[in-house]
Amino acid sequence: MNKRYSLHHIHSADEFTFSPSEYSYFKYGDRSYAEKFAKELFDGFIAENQEVLDTEKEIVVLPSPYMAIPTASNFLCFYFKKHLDFYLFRKGKKSSILSKINRNHTYTTDYGNLSFEDRKNLIANDTYYLDKDFLHGKLCIFIDDIKITGSHEYTVNKILKQYNVEGEFLFMYYAELMNFKIDPKIENFFNYYAVKNVEHVAEVMLKPSFQFNTRIVKYILGLESSNFEYLSSKIKNVQMDELLELAISNNYHLIKEYENNINTLTQTELYYGY
């Protein structure tokens, strides 16, 4: 079985059944919207597809591939799993298992500005790993926040075929572009809808519900020096510490475009005696 479910369908470039503002905050690390979207996604799915979960197979949930820093969809996936597990509990079934597709490379390109072919070519240079033996014979639910060109699904299917993984595969999205006359760059319309500048980023980072993800880390490391200094003056020292740890964990210190800001972070660490 290879099945797809999406909660919201995008047919128009200016009318939507979800909030672009909430989506934008979600993409820049506001975990409260990941929790909200996950509940909406689970409720919508179970209302129409309950029979999919009436299976004796073990259920595995997987967010979009990442290296060391989770994507925004990882938090969507985490909260979705909580709702799924409670549903399985009430049915007397085993809870689901959280798994991961590992990736070995990263890039500075803004994915939301690319066409399907450009996205496909970009990720073709990446390498991915999943535990094929672990996934064998299971119901695998691949969760992502939005489907625009289908490059994510294309990549996952390619990996599954490459590793000869046999099982049932369900691709699930909070929203999906249905009208292919709309430019794929609409993804960045959603990404930047409410978070348009460094001041907005600082506001999100000061929320109790903030948590770093790949997008926000790349955004900060790519800031020009004056904006980076502004952000550094607004956020907490502990966030600066975490930012450096995450940057190193994802090998961002090896990317020239991020070099200056990572060096600044390193000097700050040394200043505080680390």
Image: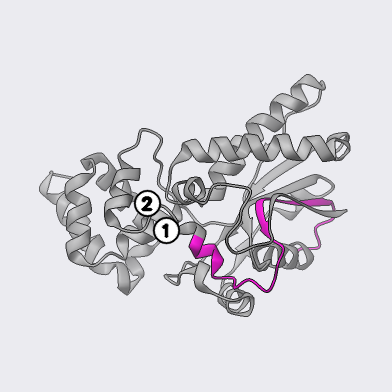
**Residue 151, picture quadrant:** bottom right
Q: Is residue 126 above or below residue 70?
A: below
Marks 2/1: CA distance? 6 Å
In front of the other: 209 or 192: 192
Residue 47 visible in the shown view: yes
Tell which of 272 and 183 is nearer to you: 183
Horizontal relation, residue 59 to residue 36: left or right: right
Left or right: where 93 falls relative to 271:
right
Vertical position of residue 86 compared to residue 264: above or below = above
Task: Say left or right for 87 vs 205.
Answer: right
The residue under label 2 is 246
Would residue 169 be counted in the magenta stretch? yes
> Where does the image place residue 273, in percent across and percent down from the top left?
13, 44
SS at mark 1? loop
Badge count: 2
Q: Residue beneath label 1, please?
A: 250
- Give the magenta-colored segment's residue range: 163-189
Whether residue 269 is visible: no
Q: Position of residue 129 (x, y in %)?
A: 63, 60
Secondary structure found at label 2 = helix
